[in-house]
Image (tube, helix red, strand yellow):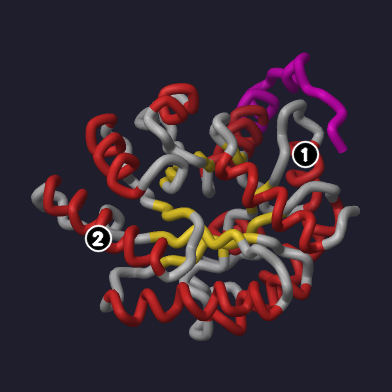
Amino acid sequence: MTDLATRARTLLDLHTDPEILVLANVWDVISARVVADVPGVKALATASHSIAATFGYEDGENIPLELHLDMVRRVVQAVDIPVSMDFEAGYGDPGRTAARAIEVGVVGANLEDQMRPLDEAVAHVEAVMAAGRAAGIDFVLNARTDVFVKAAPDADRQGLVDEAIRRGKAFLDAGAPVVFVPRLVDREEIRQVASALGERKLTLISPPGAALPASELQELGVARVSTGPFTQRVALTALQDAATDIVGGGVLPATTRALN
């Protein structure tokens, strides 16, 4: 496996390449290996929601950080490509959590702002970036703003777009290389945010039935698209459907492959 600094630089470069970075999020060793073996996969990202669910915890930093980090460490050790971790809002101390993630081999992360006051959210971004510098790596912080996640259903859409841009620019100014805006799915709204933040500065999530194809997002200037908990839900849907079929008198799918 390449050294930490090289993996960090590789991950950073993948966000600025003309080709959009597509990440199918993973949650344990076998999911990491299966995804890493897919041709064209150049990096991995863990999904905090999925890791929590694996151990029976609700999303939202309910899984103990030690347990969360241990699973991420196992993922890092199982593959030879860069790994980014979703450490939610930083478990109360984003800088320290980033340092501990780096210690287990992580070279990038998602950090939620949870719509905290902007100066506080910016300070959290700065703390994470400082942890990366202290470790001697170009840590790839995917600074997340929850403008759309926390918005009321009847909120003014243009106001949300403007606030996402305001917060995103502040995070970029604080050193984050990219900004993550979940639940941003409308083409014109994506165009506005991507244009305001700059080429290859915006990252998105791909919810089933609502997301634009990665090829269109690339044309709009998006740097990265990931899947969050949805890849685990795809796997669990297939499992439950197969169980339903076999319990109902059928058989397992003939297309099943020996991936473990």
Q: Is residue 153 above or below residue 247?
A: below
Is 154 covered by the magenta stretch?
Answer: no
Q: For numbered disc 2, what is the local secondary structure?
A: helix
Q: Please tell me which residue is depicted at 33% across the width and 66% down the height of the picture.
A: 170
* 5 and 214: which is toward the camera: 5
Q: Which residues are magenta?
A: 243-260
Dot 2 surroundings within 10 Å: few (below 14), some, or many (20 or more)?
some
Q: Is residue 194 above or below residue 107?
A: above
Q: Is residue 124 above or below residue 230?
A: below
Is 250 covered by the magenta stretch?
Answer: yes
Q: Which mark is residue 109?
A: none
* 152 and 144: which is toward the camera: 144
Left or right, residue 38 beside residue 128 = right
Left or right, residue 30 beside residue 65 = right
Could you tell me the amino acid type at mark 2? Arg
Residue occupied by mark 1? 36
Could you tell me the amino acid type at mark 1? Ala
Q: Earlier in the sequence, mark 1 or mark 2?
A: 1
Q: Please tell me which residue is depicted at 34% across the width and 49% down the height of the picture.
A: 197
Q: Main secondary structure of the magenta part?
A: loop
Position in image of residue 73 (x %, y %):
78, 65
Residue occupied by mark 2? 166
- In space, the residues marked 1 and 2 are separated at their CA atoms by 35 Å
* Image quarter of the C terminus: top right
